[in-house]
Image (cartoon, rainbow, N blue to C red):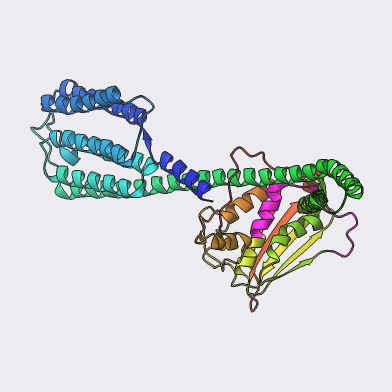
Amino acid sequence: MNLRLNLLTETTTWRRSVRLETLIRLRWFALAGQTAAIFTVFWGLDSSLPIEWCLIAVGASAWLNISLRLRYPANHRLDAPEAGASLAWDILQLAFLLFLTGGLENPFAFLFLAPVLISATSLPPRMTLSIGVLAVACASVVAFVHLPLPWEWRDDLRLPTLYLFGVWAALVLCISFIGLYAWQVAEESRQFTDALAATELVLARELHLSQLDGLAAAAAHELGTPLATIALVTKELAGELPKDGPIGEDMALLGEQVKRCREILAKLKSLSGGDAPFDTMPLAQLIEEVVQPHRFFDVAITVDLPENREGGPVIQRNPAVLYGLGNIVENAVDFARSSVAIKAHWDNSQVAVIIADDGPGFPPDIVDRIGEPYLTRRGKGRSRRAADEEQIGEEPSGMGLGVFIAKTLLERSGARITFRNRTAPETGAIVEVVWPRAAFRDGLSGPAPRAVPVQPAQTET
């Protein structure tokens, strides 16, 4: 679990950085626009701007771009403080240009939004908040302290104070709203991408375990014949050699070890089910395999299957489906007070598995959002995975990805999942997983993993 958490943390940190080349190109684009605007106003409109100071401000940003290009390689990524400092420079440079050219009377004042928008989509919330506060502070200063903006028909332009206050208020609202909106959209995208990456990691692990399962069965099968030969030869030698003395003791020990090897191989066969990892299996066997690891806790698990199972759905052994159903059952065991009921039924059009517990049920404020990434609440920690964490001294923890991963994997297999609570006065949660019958005929083919196998997280909705 720690490896998976580290992988996701490193991935999230990497996505919180900004490529230096991106900021350099955006700054060159801004400098080109600023230079064009300055010369257009100075020569085209014949306005008496302090062009020397304006060009000094533009030149300072150009010098910064050149210095960064010479110091760092093109693929260098800036961390949050470095990127924040670069965006803060852009705000201060723009504020200085606005001071020289009319303050908020200059329509280009709304360019304060650009650094805030870049920060909101790529930097942490605290850094974005700092950038936004700096932009608002600079806008407030240049609203009152600035050089006049000359016009050809007047010596300078003096707009009413109420109008300037409206421009300032509009600018502040735009910075706040657009910054928050851009951050929210980017954060949801990042979370969804990270959650999908975790899904691929879990699926890869389940596939790896399934492959190990098959290797265990193959090893047990292949080693059975030579071990039987060894047992036979050992028995014959034990009959020919004297039973007393060192040789007799060695032969007895050899016979015991052969017997122990047979027991180990038999256990491997029982753990693997005696089947190849992708052999077909009826739905009843799939449910029993999912439920079996959770029968050792103080929660009674009942499985209700149709009495007539002829023509029942038969599927391939699918790690994605096994993990998805297993996670839902694990959640039900964690939150149940005393019992979990699993019911399966099918007809010619669909196959349904319903998992219900007698716990407190889903909180009303999140029942419509269940299945979103990083939506978490803790249960009693009675699952096998929670017991393992407690045994090795770890605190049960969750990233809120378990149900998202289960829902994603099951939906990829063609299932439709619904979450609801029991009807009052009963309490508890109900999860219904429904596949079209055609999905079972097609083998419930799941996605191929693209990531290395790691241990899945202990998660809860």
* Residue 170 percent location from the top left of the image: 27, 48
Residue at image point 11% right, 32% down: 150
On-image quarter of the C terminus = bottom right
Q: Residue furthest front?
A: 245
Q: Is residue 298 above or below residue 160?
A: below
In x, y percent, where is residue 193? 52, 43
* Nearest to the observer: residue 60 or residue 103: 60
Which residue appears at 55% of the width and 43% of the height? 197
Q: Quadrant of residue 57?
A: top left
Q: Give, as a single range, the part of the protein colored magenta.
A: 306-328
Q: Residue 432: give x, y in percent of width and height.
A: 69, 60
Could you tell me if residue 258 is visible in this image?
yes
From this view, report whether residue 342 is shown above or below residue 46: below
- Is 375 inside the magenta-drawn segment? no
Q: Quadrant of residue 367?
A: bottom right
Asked whether the viewer can see residue 420, the reply is: no
In this view, the residue in front, 53 or 231, is 231
Whether residue 52 sits left or right of residue 458 in the image: it is left
Left or right: where 62 falls relative to 394: left
Vertical relation: 432 (above or below) 140: below
**Residue in the image at 65% along x and 71% along y:** 422
Which quadrant of the figure has residue 446? top right
Which one is nearer the viewer's eye here, 422 or 212? 212
Counting from the top left corner in percent of width and height, residue 32 is at 27, 24
- In the picture as drawn, the residue positioned furthest to the bottom comes out as 425
Left or right of 385 in this view: 250 = right
Does the segment drawn in magenta span residue 311? Answer: yes
Number of numbered callouts drawn: 0
